[in-house]
Image: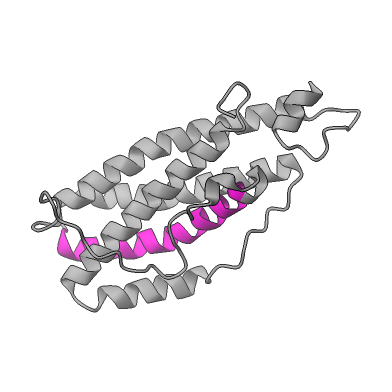
Amino acid sequence: MSRREGSLEDPQADSSISPLPHLEAKIRQTHSLARLLTKYAEQLLQEYVQHQGDPFGLPGFSPPRLPVAGLSAPAPGHAGLPAPERLRLDAAALSALPPLLDVVRRHQAELNPRAPRLLRRLEDAARQARALGAAVEAVLAALGAETRGPPVEPAAAAAAAAAAATDAGVFPAKVLGLRVCGLYREWVSRTEGDLGQLVPGGPA
């Protein structure tokens, strides 16, 4: 039992009253949520591309990777970090995504008012990112780890910067939306992978 607790990096592994069953259940539940949202994130990205017109979706089209205020892709060394640190980064990214997704949804409501499924997916994605971020923070708390992640740009400032980018023109706004949807997929998938390593019997 203590070896399994150690694999979860539980700083309270030597406690006389083991929190392991509760911790395992919380990890499994959050991992299942992340796995489901990974599928939804892929569907969102595909739906987004379908509604942007040419050159989006054309073979060989490589849009510029616009920077997104307050959010970047998982770093190359992410997988090598300790589990609590990875989860803190996941939670921080997930907390930054909802206002950015809201900006994309508002812009798409103007460009594609007859695409209710896309608009609904964007709205759902913002809500789901909040839910998954809160669940990851709950896992961190159950692990006894500090839940506060690295400093990030305030959500309001990030959303304002994204909104300003959409004002630069239709094409840059579409590219920004594509980037935000892509980052949503990357971070949800990364969160699924990080949690999967903590699931008993999962990959080491």
Going by the image, does 94 lie left or right of 139? left
Name the residue at 31% across, 59% down. 179
* Secondary structure mostly seen in the magenta stretch: helix
Residue 183 x %, y %? 38, 54
**One can see residue 105 in this view:** no
Q: Pick whichever, 186 or 131, lies toward us.
A: 186
Q: Toward which corner of the image does residue 177 lie, by quadrant? A: bottom left
Q: Toward which corner of the image does residue 144 lie, by quadrant? A: top right
Going by the image, does 64 lie left or right of 157? left
Q: Say if the magenta span includes residue 93.
A: yes
Q: Say if the magenta span includes residue 70.
A: no
Residue 31 x %, y %? 53, 33
Residue 136 x %, y %? 59, 44
Q: What's the magenta region?
A: 86-112
Going by the image, does 199 lie left or right of 67? right
Count of marks overlaid on the render: 0
Considering the image in quadrants, where does the N terminus appear?
top right
Q: Pick whichever, 125 or 78, lies toward us.
A: 78
Name the residue at 16% across, 58% down. 113
Q: Is residue 68 above or below residue 148?
A: below
Name the residue at 91% across, 28% down. 16
